[in-house]
Each structure stands twice: as C-alpha cells, then as structure tokens.
Image: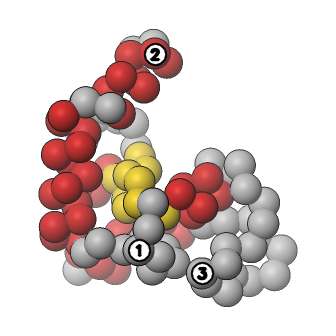
Amino acid sequence: MTHEEYLAYLRSPWWRARKALVIRFRGEACEYCGRLERLELHHLSYERLGRELPEDVVLLCSVCHQRAHGLTPTKCPWRDIEAGMLGPTFEMLADIFRTKTT
C-alpha cells in the first residue's frame, strides 16, 4: 500500500466505522490520558492493515497520537507523565489495551 493509498484508507467509510465501533465499546476518551476531544485511532500493528482486529488499534487524542509517533516531545497537558518520558511507547499502549480488555 502506498502512502497515498494509506491516507485514503484513513478517510474511508470503513475506517470511520472502525473508529465508531472502538468508541462505542471502549468509550469516548483517549485510552492514555482520558481527553475527550480530537480522538484518533492509532495502529498498534499494521499486520492486518485493512482488516484490523480490535487489539490492533488504540483510541488516542491527537496529542497522545503524535507522541506515540515521537512527533511531540512535550508533556501531555492532560496527564502527568514520568519526567524524561516523551510519550506512550508501543509497550505502554499495548498494556493499556490488555488492561481494558481483561
């Protein structure tokens, strides 16, 4: 899948429906900091891109989503995070998901 195809996929009805289902079953808040605005789905795995399972994605606010990609090295204003940490790591996000589903 090219980058352009991936961006089109993220704008597709399928992706919007996937986000709506995640919100319906996990709640309408960032799964990391609890923020209620500007929610986005973040891939924990691209292994099943286009046919994601619930455990392949996590609902994050835009700030935590950027941090998950290492794009925002500032402290999240909605949750205190340990000093020196840039954002949730893949392992932390996976732990959050496992905790919410067990």
Instruction: Kindly indicate whether the residue at mark 3 contacts the one at mark 1 (C-beta within 8 angstroms).
Output: no
How many residues crowd around disc 1 within 10 Å: few (fewer than 14), some, or many (20 or more)?
A: few
Q: Residue 4 carries which label?
A: 2
* Quarter-of-image position of residue 82: bottom right
SS category of the residue bearing label 3: loop
Check whether the beta carbons of the residues at disc 3 and disc 2 lie within 8 A of each other.
no
Report the amino acid beneath label 1.
Leu
Residue, x 60% and y 61% (percent of image)?
A: 63
Residue at the outermost front position? 37
For image coordinates 35% across by 69% down, the residue present is 97
Q: Is residue 68 visible?
A: no
Secondary structure under the numbered disc 1 in the rendered image: loop
Upstream in sequence: badge 1 or badge 3: 1
Q: Residue 36 carries which label?
A: 1
Name the amino acid, label 3.
Trp
Residue 53: image location, x then y, percent: 21, 48
Q: Quote the CA–CA distance across marks 3 and 2.
A: 32 Å
Q: Earlier in the sequence, mark 1 or mark 2?
A: 2
**Residue 69: x percent and y percent?**
62, 48
Whether residue 18 is visible here, answered yes or no, is yes
The residue that appears at 41% across and 74% down in the rendered structure is: 36
Q: Which residue is the site of mark 3? A: 78
Distance of mark 1 from mark 3, alpha carbons?
10 Å
**Above or below: residue 46 compared with residue 53:** above
In the displayed structure image, the side of residue 44 where residue 33 appears, left or right: right
**Is residue 34 placed above or below 69 in the rendered structure?**
below
Q: How crowded is mark 2: few (under 14 residues within 10 Å), some or many (20 or more)?
A: few
Left or right: 50, with 32 as reference point: left
Spatial distance from mark 1 to mark 2, Cα to Cα? 29 Å
